[in-house]
Image (cartoon, rainbow, N blue to C red):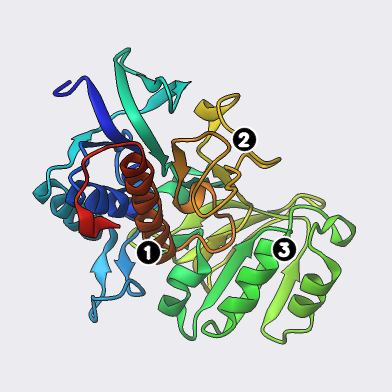
Amino acid sequence: MQESTYDLIIIGGGPSGLTASIYASRALLKTLVIAGNPAGGQLVITSDVENFPGFPEGIMGPELIANMRKQAERFGTIFMDANVSSIKGTFEEGFELDLDSGEKISAKTIIVATGASARWLGLDSENRLKGKGVSACATCDGFFFKDKVVVVVGAGDAAMEESTFLTKFASKVYILVRGDEDHTKASKIMLKRASDNPKIEFLYNTEVKEVLGERNVEGLRVLNNKTGEEKVMDDVKGLFVAIGHEPNTSFLQGFIELDAKGYIVVNSNTKTSKEGVLAAGDVADHHYRQAITASGIGCMAALDAVRLLADHGAQVKPDAY
């Protein structure tokens, strides 16, 4: 590596980590981003991004990430496309990060911005059409389905919320539930809200077997797991998978405090249970999960790191905080 010890290592190359790196590097911190492999987070599998401020015509997700990375590099941020396997150490003695390559890197402070990954159905056809009608975020992509028929897969509150939101755009929303009506996991109020919506129809004991279409979603082949009957829903033009998210925190087990679902517990602003380790973006936020909120929290985390280092004698750019 180019440096033996960094002022700040940011783990994660999505909008949160990249925003943090811009602020940190402009504050003259020696900053390394371990961007993941592959790098870029959820936005690199997102097509049109129309809700990130500053782009009135929208921007492709990979292009947005590339622009943010170039901006960080302009101010001196160093990048590695790698993954962290474990971390040890303290703020007083320094932190040591083990990479999946076997390399070890030292840091004075750390920002964890590894995000959360959507759970998918695991179908080849689903993977092929991600960003082409298959999505895990109604807030991000619902606008593209005006007057179209869509399907939401899921039985919890997230599925009910996504479905209700989609009725603002779609002409019809089917909710596919693997079990019967008694096994719906959603809270009563969320279930009632969806059930009372005239645009929503529940299909119980139903699973997606294949997503149809070459360039875009052109239908679904589904199975009734109770009767064994298969049918094609050829009017469906969008599939939203709402079966939960997994925070990318397995490498943090035993190092900092995580909640029951594996998200990082943030005690104050972006501070975690261990001094010198900060968290930003979806890895600590299971509510909003938007690129713009992740970026905002990335800014906060960088400023918190700058203040912490300045309080302990580091030379930083005064206007950074």
User: Which of the numbered marks, if any, corresponds to residue 257?
Assistant: 2
Depth check, front residue: 321 or 47: 321
Give the distance between the C-alpha atoms of the residues marked 2 and 3, in whole angstroms: 26 Å
Residue that mark 1 sits on: 216
Amino acid at dot 3? Asp
Residue that mark 3 sits on: 157
Q: SS for tag 2?
A: loop
Give the distance between the C-alpha atoms of the residues marked 1 and 2, in whole angstroms: 42 Å
Left/right of residue 233 with respect to residue 27 in the rendered view: right
Category of crowding for the residue at label 1, using alpha-carbon neighbours closer than 10 angstroms: few (below 14), some (14–19), many (at least 20):
some
Amino acid at dot 1? Asn
Could you tell me which residue is drawn at 42 percent across and 58 percent down? 297
For the N terminus, which image quadrant? Answer: top left
Q: SS for tag 1?
A: loop
- The part of the image, by quadrant, that contains residue 285 is bottom right
Q: Earlier in the sequence, mark 1 or mark 2?
A: 1
Give the distance between the C-alpha atoms of the residues marked 3 and 1, in whole angstroms: 27 Å
Amino acid at dot 2? Glu
